[in-house]
Image (spheres, helix red, strand yellow):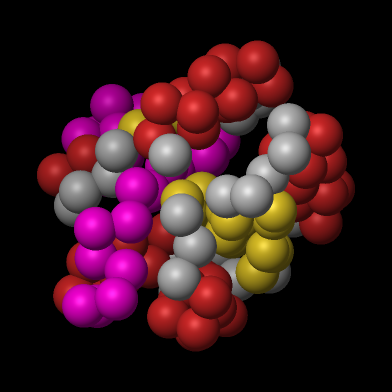
Amino acid sequence: MKTILLIEDNIDMSENTAEILELADYQVITAENGKIGIELAALCQPDLIISDVTMPEVDGFEVLEELRKSITVRNTPFIFLTARTEKENMSTGMELGANAYITKPYDGNELLRIVAKMI
């Protein structure tokens, strides 16, 4: 079973997204902010990381920057799942090394299709 780290500070969004992924037979580990997400990524070495952008303590862009420096997870596929729809934010995410940028509200089938391509 493939493991996905989901970094999302909104509890409802986190629970709903985790449920969609779990129903598709993925193991999901959740982190409620970027700081915890960075720690869990190093500890669990997931097959894929999905992260919000706007979060307390450490935002998603900072998470990706830190993870790309890590020997253990720097090549792990990374998807932004965020309400930030501005082209500037999408460009920043992709320039930092994200593999995909999905905006909220999202379609669960689209998310699963992208996840399946990544892992």
Q: Residue furthest front?
A: 1
For the C terminus, give its image quadrant.
top left
Check the image and report above or below for 110 versus 86: above
Which portion, as a residue range, is magenta? Answer: 70-93
Q: Nearer the viewer, residue 90 or 101?
A: 101
Q: Is residue 63 above or below residue 106?
A: below
Horizontal arrangement in the rendering, residue 8 relative to residue 119 (left or right): right
Farthest left residue? Answer: 95
Judged left or right of residue 11, residue 113 is left
Q: Quadrant of residue 17?
A: top right
- Front residue of 85/113: it is 113
83 relative to 58, above or below: above
The residue lying at 29 percent from left, 76 percent from top is 72
Find out whether residue 20 is within the magenta segment: no
Give the image location of residue 40, x and y in percent. Answer: 54, 78
Q: Residue at x 53, y 75 (%)?
A: 44
Q: Quadrant of residue 6?
A: bottom right
Asked if residue 105 can be seen in this view, the reply is yes
Q: Residue at x 81, y 56 (%)?
A: 11
